[in-house]
Amino acid sequence: MAKGRKRTCPHCKRSFTAVGLADRPSFPFCCDQCRLLDLGRWLNNEYAVVEDLSRGQELKARIPEASDVSDPDVKAALDELDT
Ligand SMILES: [Zn+2]
């Protein structure tokens, strides 16, 4: 039997198969790019709840570990975090 579960990325709505969390560090997103862009939207107040700043900083601290920051959209999201 296949172990993967069908998931839908909350950011780009693409469906992907998640085998395990270790296999998907960007879970529940399909990739790091979606995770970062979604995070950027959070920090831009596009979502309603942004009161827990310590959580945002914790997430920000993890961003340098993200594999691909060569995408201009991701860079823009990171720039937003620095302001
Ligand atoms: Zn996605």
Image (spheres, grey):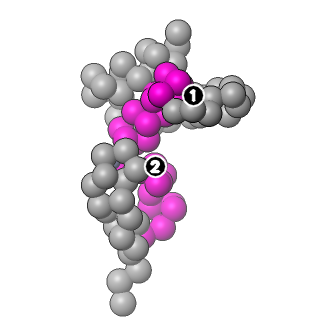
Q: Find residue 24 and report its image quarter.
A: bottom left
- The residue lying furthest to the bottom in this view is 1
- The residue lying furthest to the top in this view is 83
Callout 1 secondary element: helix
13 or 60, which lies in front?
13
Q: Mark 1 highlights which residue?
A: 60
47 or 14, which lies in front?
47
Indicate yes or no whether the magenta region holds residue 35: yes
Tell me if 45 is positioned left or right of 73 in this view: right
Residue 2 visible in image: yes
22 or 32, which lies in front?
32
Hey, what amino acid is under mark 2?
Ser
Q: Mark 2 highlights which residue?
A: 26
Query: How far across and down, in percent of the image, does residue 30 sit?
Result: 36, 52
10 or 83, which lies in front?
10
Q: Quadrant of the N terminus?
A: bottom left
Tell me if 73 is positioned left or right of 78 in this view: left
Residue at 46% x, 16% y: name it: 80
